[in-house]
Every structure is written in structure tokens, then in C-alpha cells.
Amino acid sequence: MRIGSYAVTVGSINQTKKIEVIGNNLANASTPGFKKEDVRFIDFVYAETHTDMTQGNIKTTSQSLDVALVGNGFFKVQKKEGIFYTRAGNFMLDASGQLILPDGSLVLGKNGSPITLKSYDVIIDEGGRIFEGGKVVDQLAVVSFDKSVKMERVGYNLFKPSDKDAKEQDAKEVVVKQGSLEEANFNVVEEMTKMIDTMRAFEAYTKVYQVGHEEDRQLIRRVVSR
């Protein structure tokens, strides 16, 4: 195979990776707190996925257990696999009254324990304190990490620090907003435009490959027929 064919093949693979990432972004356009991903090519062959951690728009829902973070910080949650962090605040109560995410992750309080409530009739202030019946019953754990710490995506909407030794700290410059949700941090129209451009590039690579393949076939036929 000619060098040009190798280049076209690699280009097609790169565009395929872009299509997968953009498609995943679009599939999560309505996912609270979702952070979009981009593909960065280290060189002509290798690519890495980068997560954009900028804040999305804040949407008012007026639901008592919908909570958004305005500023840098994460909610702290627990799964069987361990402790994780998220920007998603679409909380609910399970059968035992524990505060959870839709995937079953337990939302943790500042004391490190799961939060248990009696009902949805609660007030959450800007510091994350939860009032039930006029009394403080718990406080949301809202933490942050040093800017040098890279957060890795785990699943579709949870994160963990890439450095296992990274220390969490209380998020200071953040406001907890009850009755609101953070939206995905990208513009759907712009992402759709990227998808169209990427698919066109993929189609162009495919056509070039087909032309080159046909030229090789014709050359082989000529050689064999001699």
C-alpha cells in the first residue's frame, strides 16, 4: 500500500474518533452538569480526549432537590467502587430517604456520610446547609481540587482526580443554588455543525481511499495481463 493510502486510513480513523466524541456530547445535551469532550491529536496518529470543565448555564426548575453549583466545585458522591465527584445536582430520594443521583450514587454530607431526609420539603441555602422543619439536618459536601489536578471522567457524569494523592478541599468561591440545574456546557447548534464538518471530512477520506484502491486494482490487472 502506498504512503498516501496509509495517511488516508489514519485520517479516517481520526475522524471516526471525533464523530464518536461529538455524538456522545450531543447524546448528553440534556444531562445536568455534563461536561463536553474534545479530541486533541498529539501527532498524526495518536489522539487524546480532553474534558472541558467550564461551567454551563444555570436553569431554574423550582424543584426542591434540584441543586446547581455556581463557581468551581463538585458534589461528593459514593458508589460501591468508591468516592466520586460530579456537577450534576438532579437529586432524588430512594426508598429509605437517602439523597441520591438517578444512577443510585449516594450524595454525601460534609461529615462524609450519606444524607437522609424525611421528605422533599426542604430548604437548601447558598452554603449547602439543608433545613427540614426549620432545623439544619445536614450540609452538602461541596469540594474542589487544586487547579493543577486533572479530573478524569468515570462513566457518563462522574469524575475523580487523576492523581490518587490529590487532596480535596472545601470549595470556597462557590454558591449552592436550590431549585436550579447546571446545563451541559456546550451549544447544541455549534456541536451539530462540528458533527457535519467531521462527517464531510470522513466522507472525503473515504472517497480518496476508494479512488486509490481502484487505481491499485487497475495497475495490478495491467501487470497480470502482460
Image (cartoon, helix red, strand yellow):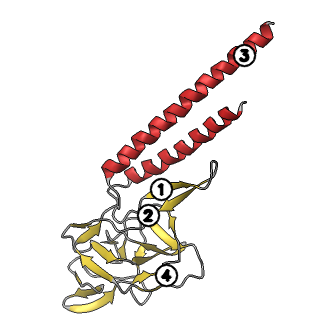
Around disc 2, counting alpha carbons within 10 Å, would you say few (fewer than 14), some (14 to 19), or many (20 or more)? Answer: few
Q: Which mark is residue 146?
A: 4
Residue at the spot 38% in from the left edge and 50% down from the top edge: 26
Q: Which residue is mark 1?
A: 38
The residues tagged by marks 2 and 4 sit, at their Cα atoms, a distance apart of 16 Å
Dots 1 and 3: beta carbons under 8 Å? no
Q: Which mark is residue 52?
A: 2
Camera-near label (3 vs 4) is 3
Give the percent coordinates (x, y) of residue 72.
38, 77
Disc nearer the start of the sequence (2/3):
2
Q: Which residue is mark 3?
A: 219
Give the percent coordinates (x, y) of residue 34.
38, 62
Query: Helix, strand, or loop for circle 3?
Result: helix
Q: Amino acid at mark 4?
A: Asp
In this figure, what is the number of numbered marks? 4
Asked where in the image residue 111 lies, by quadrant, the reply is: bottom left
Dots 2 and 1: beta carbons under 8 Å? yes
Query: Helix, strand, or loop for circle 2?
Result: loop
Residue at the spot 69% in from the left edge and 21% down from the top edge: 216
Residue at the spot 21% in from the left edge and 70% down from the top edge: 63
The residues tagged by marks 1 and 3 sit, at their Cα atoms, a distance apart of 41 Å
Disc nearer the start of the sequence (4/1):
1
Between 40 and 177, the residue placed more toward the observer is: 40
The residues tagged by marks 2 and 3 sit, at their Cα atoms, a distance apart of 48 Å
- Quadrant of the rendering where the N terminus is positioned: top right
Disc nearer the start of the sequence (2/1):
1
Query: Helix, strand, or loop for circle 4?
Result: loop
Q: Amino acid at mark 2?
A: Asp
Camera-near label (2 vs 3) is 3
